Amino acid sequence: MKRTHYTVRIIASDRFPTPPPPPFQDSYPVRLTDGNYLELPLQPFPDGKQAIALLMSNQTPFAVEQALTPLLADAARAFEPEAIAGIPTLGLDYARVVAKNLGLPDYVALGTSRKFWYDDTLSVPVVSVTSPDAKKSLYLDPSLLERVAGKRTLIVDDVINTGGTAIAAIQLLQTAGTIVVGLVVVLTEGHDWKEPLSQIAPELVQQVRGLGHIPIFEQVDGGWAPILATQF
């Protein structure tokens, strides 16, 4: 059955003193760093055998964004960044509010749309798990280079899953002479991102901070259950 609505909400910690056990039906409560839960709808893959907890950051209620922003800012503050870079598209809103909360004068929005004044030397190819067939590149606007060059820069995104986009952002910023100090995301998803990240920036594997973690789900009797995967 196709989804006809998208419902996301924050659930207070006293609702679930301990995380609820599987199986899950239509949604999954993600425990956040403050003890509260982010309830996300479960979205089955086309084959119906597996599912993900779906965070569509540009479609969440403002109340959810307001609840997540201070948590992201706290996680980001620990890195003492001098600059914030956001990954398109869904990480840009979070990067902006995090930079503002940290008292920074601005932030850098990386992009996938090439403007005519862009320099191809400030671009890298990227493959997104949500758009695996789309051939695209990640760009840094040359006019924003001074915002990150030589600075301790923190990358902000909504979710890290395979790590493809995050790795492209790291490589792009390093090309620009940036000191990438870490990555802050709303959620880490699975563990597939750890191996490829360790290959290009092993020091950053332990510098990824998420407000919560979402597993991949498999269909079981009565609903959906997290797939128990060996962590890297």
Image: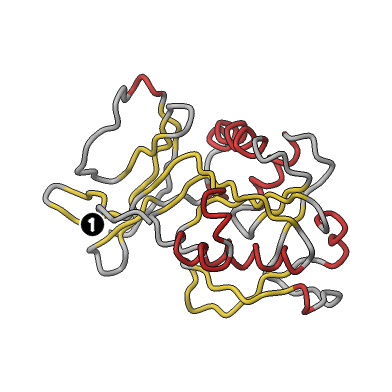
Q: Quadrant of the N terminus?
A: bottom left
Q: In terms of image quadrants, where is residue 71? A: top right
In the displayed structure image, the side of residue 85 where residue 232 appears, left or right:
left
From the viewer's perspective, is residue 92 above or below residue 71? Answer: below
Could you tell me which residue is drawn at 73 percent across and 49 percent down? 84
Q: In terms of image quadrants, where is residue 104? A: top right
In the displayed structure image, the side of residue 147 where residue 13 appears, left or right:
left
- Which is nearer the eye, 209 or 214? 209
Extreme front residue here?
A: 203
In the displayed structure image, the side of residue 165 where residue 151 appears, left or right:
right
Please say which color scheme the image uses.
Answer: secondary structure
Mark 1 Cα-neighbour bin, 10 Å: few <14, some 14–19, many ≥20: some
From the viewer's perspective, is residue 69 above or below residue 53? Answer: above
Could you tell me which residue is drawn at 62 percent across and 68 percent down? 168
* Residue 98 pos. (x, y %): 68, 40
* Residue 8 pos. (x, y %): 44, 40
* Residue 50 pos. (x, y %): 27, 61
Could you tell me which residue is drawn at 64 percent across and 60 percent down? 88
From the viewer's perspective, is residue 52 above or below residue 62? Answer: below
Extreme top residue here?
A: 14
Could you tell me which residue is drawn at 57 percent across and 65 percent down? 165
Q: In terms of image quadrants, where is residue 14? A: top left
Residue type at numbered disc 1: Glu
Q: Quadrant of the C terminus?
A: bottom left
From the viewer's perspective, is residue 154 above or below residue 193? Answer: above
SS at mark 1?
A: strand
Circle count: 1
Q: Which residue is mark 1?
A: 218
* Residue 181 pos. (x, y %): 67, 50
